[in-house]
């Protein structure tokens, strides 16, 4: 187990210790507050001779022995561990930044005497949690101070600055950009590490930190380069902390409540830092609308061009519409964050669970085909009705499960620090697990949309229109994974139009399935306040995970292979180019799918060899967004990938490369042409 | 089919396209379809949302588009009705009346000039370059926007006399939008193979060295002509 995962696991020790000590305390809420305090106070931090921000956990502190860990885990078994999601939000840190920890604690404490019911305990738990945050930051200050003695002279001044900053923000409000970004780190880190919350979004750094940046720049306290370095350090801290295969989002640009563009210097710095740090976290999303400056878009495209990172583009108009349709007021709909991948949650007020759950659209299709092989429907419409009924029941079961988790969490959860930093918990005097938050939606995601539509069309043609086979026959072929039926598989795959080829016959199937699941989700209400169950169409890793466990499908997909990697066409079916893929993908309304819509495009690095070429790429992205695209991310493919594409062409059929003045699919080229392209790709990577 | 492998006998092939239609694996591809101008315009206009953003449009290429002048004209009229930007790539080898017919619809001509020496032009292409050069001048004087494109093939037309003749020509065409050199690349070779045609032995199998291309650019600069290099050239 690597260092990062160990840190999460070792939390069991201070947690167990705290809960043991608080056994005589009546209120579970207060015990959770004490737990947060004790866990945070126990964290051991480290700083080396290059870091300029505190916040890195020391690897396994000596006090945690394997036996103490075992005993702690054993003890914790007494406490039910409620399921359901955590985190996936950007926190409400305005009061923390405006007042500072001490004054904030005072203001919370002052609510206790007049508090009714459980609120008094809630406020107490908030105070305990703040004590923990303060202790954590004090620890950091001490750690920096201790390092001074053993450091080189040149380094000592820098450590002094770090220590002063921490000593200050452990109690007072931040006075500078450094203070602010350091406090932002500690707050997000503390909620995650102190309350086992996966994950908290750093979010809109260009909104939360801008006033501090502006003041420092205007008053000559820092330079742009200083700020850039601090942002880079912040990014590095994220990578030191968050384990692999997850996602940590930063978002830049966008609009304010009056519809004005909010892009500023920090928006650019956040992107630039990405290109300098070149690590996997965070992702930076550009919140795009018609008023977004060209320079910001061009900077994002340049980063993509260099292949070191891939900023994503989000359609602000589409997303804001979706949020308003869910009841978010017009002056709040501009404040959202992609909570990890592409799922949207309102900033500062979210108890929204995302990706809860992922639905395997094709898995259920195969179940229905099984059923049909015994009692076949007499028309395609009847068939789709039966499939929809099946899906409807599954969605209902899933909602029940999520609601069950919500009830469990109310009993056995509670997260005081996260609650303090989530509207409207403080005002209501309620924990986030007890309905304190303003938004309590649950968002789900439907995996395999493209494969479903493609499969339905094949079924419509082969079984109902042409009558080339029955359900029993198709089931046999699918169960055999197309063995001895390769010609049939190729016919299923290539004789019929596919989603992504700009053909209305199959694009309409996608649109109608999206419409169906949206309507279905709307039927349900979510605990505790009757809020929304919201659909999405993104996959994270679930296209592979679910694909692995699903048999062959009528679209020609073999058993165990991945589904489409988002809401776009399935792998290798974009045979008419990226413009057709975009036209297909934007034929349906993305705005209801606030649960997240992902659309990936893949290009070879050779496409970016000139300003002109980058401009074409930019135009492609903007056309997509203008047509209502929710989100897109561009993958730049280098020589290594080209090599793999030669060896496994089926997995790379949609890879577009630049030839002499035009573009084509890499896998369609002759071996000699492929050689030439690979040579050129190497050439351009200088 | 013999021994599990498809064999194509081009001697008796009538190019009916039926085998390609049935080949779901995509191993056989029929290149070229008969289409009406309307059908083509429908296809072109599918991408209009993208042109609106990028300022792109329709480019007629070939073969020689002006050899199907009525068709080219119909396409251009249709595209212009939708306010698309229109380009025509031409070898210049056509009746000038055809140029006159379409010039009003064309935003930019991409005009190829392969060889200024007439004898060599006949040797390389089978036809004289007199019409091509006359058409170029006449089209220029008509007021059309023209981008001159010069394919340069080492061992054939990368000669100084050709460069000098081009430079002299360019001086008489002050309103050219630009001059572009197209360095040779070998990607055409595989096309021969796929059509089952023998590859011409003298066709080089590698691209032109970047350094050599830059030397060409410098030479043109010395001769007073600022040339750009087609994007397809240097990777």
Image (cartoon, rainbow, N blue to C red):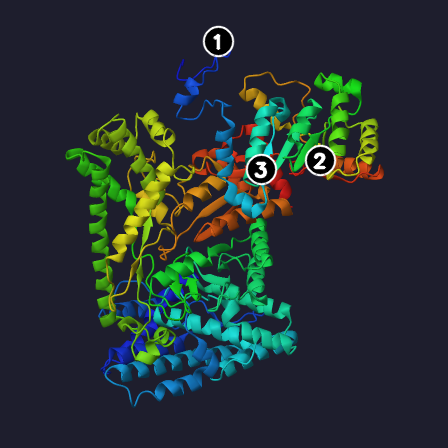
Residue at mark 3: chain: B
Residue at mark 1: chain: B
**Residue at figure coordinates x 25%, y 26% from the top left:** A467
The residue that mark 3 highlights is B80
Q: Nearer the viewer, mark 1 or mark 3?
A: 3
Instruction: Find the distance from the CA under tag 1 to the CA under tag 3.
Output: 43 Å
Q: Is residue A289 left or right of residue A561?
A: right
Q: How many marks?
A: 3
Q: Residues within 10 Å of mark 3 (few under 14, many from 20)?
A: some
- The vertical placement of A461 against A626, above or below, is above
Q: Where residue B175 appears, x then y in whole percent? A: 77, 39
The residue that mark 2 highlights is B144
Front one among A335 and B231: A335
Front one among A238 and A120: A120
The residue that mark 1 highlights is B12
Q: Where residue A673 appears, x then y in whole percent? A: 57, 30
Q: Nearer the viewer, mark 2 or mark 1?
A: 2
Instruction: Find the distance from the CA under tag 3 to the CA under tag 2.
Output: 16 Å
């Amino acid at each position: 187990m690597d260092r990062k995962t160990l840190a999460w696991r070792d939390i069991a020790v201070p947690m167990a210790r705290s809960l043991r000590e608080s056994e005589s305390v009546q209120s579970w809420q207060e015990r959770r507050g004490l737990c947060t305090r004790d866990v945070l106070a126990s964290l051991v931090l480290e700083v080396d001779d290059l870091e300029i921000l505190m916040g890195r956990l020391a690897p396994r502190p000596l006090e945690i022995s394997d036996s103490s860990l075992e005993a702690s885990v054993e003890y914790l078994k007494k406490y039910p561990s409620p399921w359901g999601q955590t985190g996936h939000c950007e926190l409400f840190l305005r009061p923390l930044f405006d007042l500072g920890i001490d004054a904030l604690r005072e203001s919370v404490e002052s609510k206790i005497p007049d508090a009714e019911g459980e609120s008094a305990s809630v406020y107490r738990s908030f105070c305990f949690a703040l004590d923990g945050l303060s202790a954590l930051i004090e620890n950091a200050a001490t750690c920096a101070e201790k390092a001074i003695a053993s450091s080189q002279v040149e380094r000592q001044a820098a450590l002094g600055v770090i220590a002063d900053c921490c000593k200050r923000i452990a109690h007072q409000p931040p006075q500078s950009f450094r203070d602010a970004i350091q406090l932002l780190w500690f707050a997000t880190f503390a909620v995650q590490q102190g309350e086992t919350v996966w994950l908290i979004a750093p979010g809109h750094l260009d909104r939360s930190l801008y006033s501090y940046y502006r003041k420092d720049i205007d008053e000559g306290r820092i330079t742009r380069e200083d700020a850039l370095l601090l942002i880079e350090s912040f990014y590095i801290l994220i990578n030191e902390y968050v384990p692999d295969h997850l996602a940590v989002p930063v978002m830049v640009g966008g609009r304010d409540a009056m519809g004005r563009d909010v892009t500023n210097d920090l928006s650019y710095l956040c992107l630039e830092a990405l290109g300098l740090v070149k690590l996997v976290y965070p992702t930076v999303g550009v919140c795009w609308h018609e008023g977004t400056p060209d320079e910001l878009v061009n900077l994002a495209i340049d980063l993509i061009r260099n292949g070191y990172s891939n900023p994503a583009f989000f359609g602000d108009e589409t997303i804001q519409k979706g949020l308003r349709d869910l009841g978010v007021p017009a002056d709040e709909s501009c404040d959202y964050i992609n909570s990890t991948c592409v799922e949207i949650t309102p900033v500062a007020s979210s108890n929204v669970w995302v990706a809860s759950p992922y639905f395997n659209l094709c898995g259920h299709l195969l179940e229905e085909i099984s059923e049909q092989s015994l009692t076949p429907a007499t028309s395609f419409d009847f068939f789709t009705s039966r499939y929809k009924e099946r899906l409807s029941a599954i969605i209902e079961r899933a909602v029940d499960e999520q609601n069950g988790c919500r009830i469990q969490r109310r009993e056995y959860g509670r997260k005081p620090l996260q609650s303090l930093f989530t509207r409207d918990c403080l005002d209501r005097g309620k924990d986030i697990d007890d309905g304190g938050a303003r938004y309590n939606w649950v968002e789900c995601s439907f995996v395999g949309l493209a494969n479903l539509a493609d499969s339905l069309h094949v079924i419509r043609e082969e079984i109902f229109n042409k009558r080339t086979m029955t359900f029993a026959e198709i089931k046999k072929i699918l169960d055999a994974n197309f063995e001895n039926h390769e010609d049939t598989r190729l016919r299923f795959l290539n004789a019929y139009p596919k989603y992504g080829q700009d053909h209305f016959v199959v694009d309409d199937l996608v649109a109608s399935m999206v419409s169906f699941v949206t309507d279905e989700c709307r039927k349900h209400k979510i605990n505790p306040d009757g809020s929304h169950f919201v659909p999405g169409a993104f996959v994270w890793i679930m296209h592979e995970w679910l694909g692995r466990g699903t048999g062959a499908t009528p679209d020609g997909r073999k058993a165990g292979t991945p589904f489409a990697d988002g809401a776009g066409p399935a792998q290798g079916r974009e045979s008419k180019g990226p413009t057709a893929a975009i036209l297909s993908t934007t034929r349906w309304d993305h705005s209801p799918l606030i649960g997240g819509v992902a659309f990936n495009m893949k290009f070879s690095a050779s496409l970016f060899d000139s300003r002109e070429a980058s401009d074409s790429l930019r135009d492609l992205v903007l056309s997509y967004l203008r047509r209502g695209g929710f989100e897109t991310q561009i993958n730049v493919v280098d020589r290594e990938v080209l090599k793999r594409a030669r060896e496994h062409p089926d997995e790379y059929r949609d890879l577009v490369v630049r030839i002499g003045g035009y573009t084509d699919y890499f896998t369609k080229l002759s071996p000699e042409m492929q050689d030439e392209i690979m040579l050129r790709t190497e050439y351009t990577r200088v | 089919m013999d021994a599990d492998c498809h064999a194509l006998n081009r001697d008796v092939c009538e190019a009916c396209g039926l085998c390609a239609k049935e080949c779901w694996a995509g191993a056989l591809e029929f290149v070229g379809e008969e289409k009406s101008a309307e059908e083509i315009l429908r296809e072109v206009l599918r991408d209009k949302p993208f042109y609106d953003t990028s300022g792109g449009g329709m480019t007629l290429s070939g073969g020689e588009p002006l050899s199907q002048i009525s068709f080219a004209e119909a396409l251009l009229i249709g595209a212009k009705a939708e306010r698309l930007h229109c380009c025509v790539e031409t070898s210049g080898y056509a009746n000038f009346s055809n140029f006159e017919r379409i010039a009003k619809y064309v935003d930019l001509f991409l005009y190829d000039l392969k060889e200024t020496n007439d004898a060599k032009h006949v040797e390389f292409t089978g036809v004289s370059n007199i019409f091509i050069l006359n058409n170029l001048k006449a089209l220029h004087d008509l007021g059309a926007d023209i981008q001159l494109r010069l394919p340069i093939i080492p061992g054939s037309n990368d000669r100084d006399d050709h460069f000098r003749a081009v430079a002299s020509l360019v001086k008489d065409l002050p309103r050219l939008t630009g001059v572009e050199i197209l360095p040779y690349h070998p990607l055409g070779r595989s096309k021969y193979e796929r059509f089952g045609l023998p590859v011409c032995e003298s066709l080089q199998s590698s691209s032109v060295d970047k350094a050599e291309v830059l030397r060409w650019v410098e030479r043109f600069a010395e001769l007073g002509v600022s040339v750009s290099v087609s994007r397809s050239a240097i990777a």
